[in-house]
Amino acid sequence: MMRCGRGSKSSIGPSASPSVSPSASLSPSVSTSISPSQSPSISPSVSPSASLSPSISPSVSASVSPSASISPSRSPSISPSISPSISLSLSASLSPSMSPSISPSASPSTAGGTAPTFVAQYATAFNSATSPKTAMSAVAINSGDVLVAVAVAADYPKTLSITENGAGSATLQRSSVTENYCNTYGWAYAAPAGETITISFSSSGGIGEYFGGNVVRFSGSDGVGASNVATGASGSPSVSLTTTQANSAIVVIVSDWNANSGTQTFTNNFSGTPTALTDYPGDGAQYGVAIAYFPDAGAAGSKTVGMSAPTGQKWSIIAIEVRGSS
């Protein structure tokens, strides 16, 4: 810490003329030695540990020592050795080793890695009201496999349920159960270990409406992410969801209460081509069902999927994200 020197005493001699000798430069050697050893060693070593330790210790040692010795001779030898050495040693060592740890390892978990791998689909018939319908019968699956089960009933009174004998549990992700629409469902199951599993869909209520389902199996997955559902009485089927991880797959099911026939065409607002799965084109009487998956939706974020054909649908749509492996 630098100190300022003391001021030289201004010896104004004892003659009657107040010889303000120039060396007196009124030596208020106000050595305002602000000696700012202000060493604001800001050294912002932005080391990632947020110890914002600003040791501001402003030791303002204002030692004003005004030694104004007024000697009583007629010539007021004022000798103002005022040297108020205000050594204001404002040692504001602001040494904020301001390490506001901007640690870049705060990267969001939206980073992905490898897209999940489609393994197989296990579909039931869609052209009957027979219940229950078995999709998977004693199928060996591996630890970590993800199963997305989707199903549709042709009309509102008929409700659907799923049964499985695995060590885990199938959980309902989304459903649309609305009068004058097809009842549409989406479940997910993650295998906690290697096992042999049977999955069936059952219906209740209704008076003979068709129903059916499909189980879509993936490996190399970190589990299920976002999902969403939407319905519409006109226009093209469409739904948006925000994927939680890069390189996720998206499974989509669309039902049409109007049972319009025609080519089924899926759409999306990201790069990638959908893979159509077993479905049931509109039959003009019961319903239409379209199922597909997008293998890799790219970077995490908002995605929109839907259909451009057939037109004139009264639709319900469900989309479910299947994460890849990070």
Image: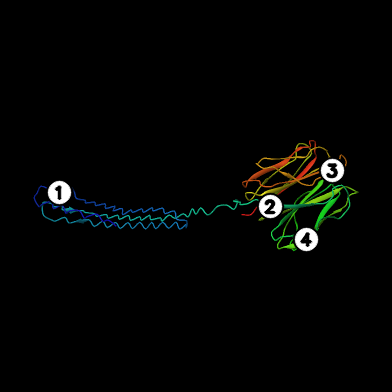
Q: Quadrant of the N terminus?
A: bottom left
Farthest residue, direction left = 15
How far apart marks 2 and 3 lie (CA) works out to: 30 Å
| For marks 2 and 3 on the same chain, the one whose residue lies earlier in the sequence | 2
Q: CA distance from mark 1 to mark 4?
A: 103 Å
Q: Secondary structure at mark 4?
A: strand
Q: Earlier along the polypeptide chain: callout 4 or callout 3? A: 4
Mark 1 vs mark 3: which is more N-terminal? 1
| Residue pointed to by mark 4 | 197
What residue did someone put label 3 on? 287
Report how far apart the C-alphas of labels 2 and 4 lie in the structure. Answer: 19 Å
At mark 2, the secondary structure is: strand
How many neighbours does mark 2 have within 10 angstroms: few (below 14), some (14-19), or many (20 or more)? Answer: some
Q: Dot 3, how many residues are within 10 Å of its Cα: few (below 14), some (14-19), or many (20+)? A: many
In the rendered structure, which amino acid carries the disc numbered 2?
Thr
Tag 2 residue:
117
Q: Amino acid at mark 3?
A: Tyr
Contact (CB < 8 A) between labels 1 and 4?
A: no
Query: Quick check: marks 2 and 4 in contact, CB under 8 Å?
Result: no
Q: How is the image coloured?
A: rainbow
| Residue type indicated by callout 1 | Ser
Q: Nearer the viewer, mark 1 or mark 3?
A: 3
Foreground label between 2 and 3: 2
Q: Nearer the viewer, mark 1 or mark 4?
A: 4
| Front in this rendered view, residue 267 or 118 | 118
The residue lying toward the viewer, choosing from 315 and 291, is 291
Q: Which residue is mark 1?
A: 23
Say if mark 2 contacts mark 1, CB within 8 Å. no
